[in-house]
Amino acid sequence: MSLHQFTGRLILLTSAQARLIPDIDTDQIFHNQHLHITEVDQMGRHALGNLEGWTHFPELVQDGDVVVAGANFGSGSSRQHAVDCFRALGVRLIIAESFGAIYKRNAINSGMSIIEFPQAGELVKTGKWEHLNPIHVDLDIGLVKMMDTDETFSIPQLSKVQRDIMAKGSLLNI
């Protein structure tokens, strides 16, 4: 399997109303009280520690999982920890209806796969994407295959810039 193909599960960041949570800011993703942590492998245990209902996230997530969120994911400050905490846990992709501009740039620059997919909320609402569904993702062709039903969904492909940066590990390596 290539860097752009992997198997994992959907981790749907939903509210009590089973809707994708919008406007998750960087302080909810990685609280500022932990900014003293500089080792990426130590950041994961604090991921989503300030997001109501999701403090258990580090125990839930597994290598290869895909996080799915609502609109404006990663709004707020430019803290790199909010990207690196997901990388530390083995999250391979973040799909959101949209991203905060600074978060989007930080994620791409550090080689994290992110995709804006405005239709994600509708797939959750209609039950086509369910929490912890096993999936296979092929970012080369923009495809998510549900492992339990064999149903497939097209998602946007990574841009050439994203693919180039991922191939080098980060923008700093280009």
Image (cartoon, rainbow, N blue to C red):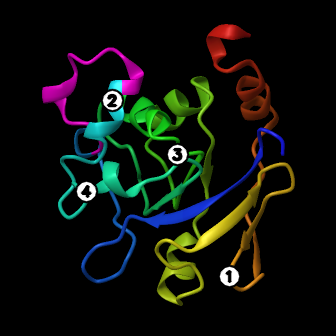
Residue 4: image location, x then y, percent: 77, 44
- Give the Cα distance between marks 1 and 2: 32 Å
Which residue is painted at 18% across and 47% down in the image? 50
* Left/right of residue 59 with respect to residue 120 in the rendered view: left
Sequence-first disc among 1 and 2: 2
Q: Is residue 34 within the magenta segment?
A: yes
| Camera-nearest residue between 107 and 135 | 135
- Judge the density around disc 4: few (<14), some (14-19), many (≥20) Cα neighbours within 10 Å: some
Sequence-first disc among 3 and 2: 2
Residue interval drawn in magenta: 29-41
Residue 36 is tagged as none
- Give the Cα distance between marks 3 and 4: 15 Å
Residue 68: image location, x then y, percent: 49, 61
The secondary structure type at the circle numbered 3 is loop
- Judge the density around disc 3: few (<14), some (14-19), many (≥20) Cα neighbours within 10 Å: many
Residue 148 is tagged as 1
User: Which residue is disc 2 drawn over?
Assistant: 43
- Give the Cα distance between marks 3 and 2: 13 Å
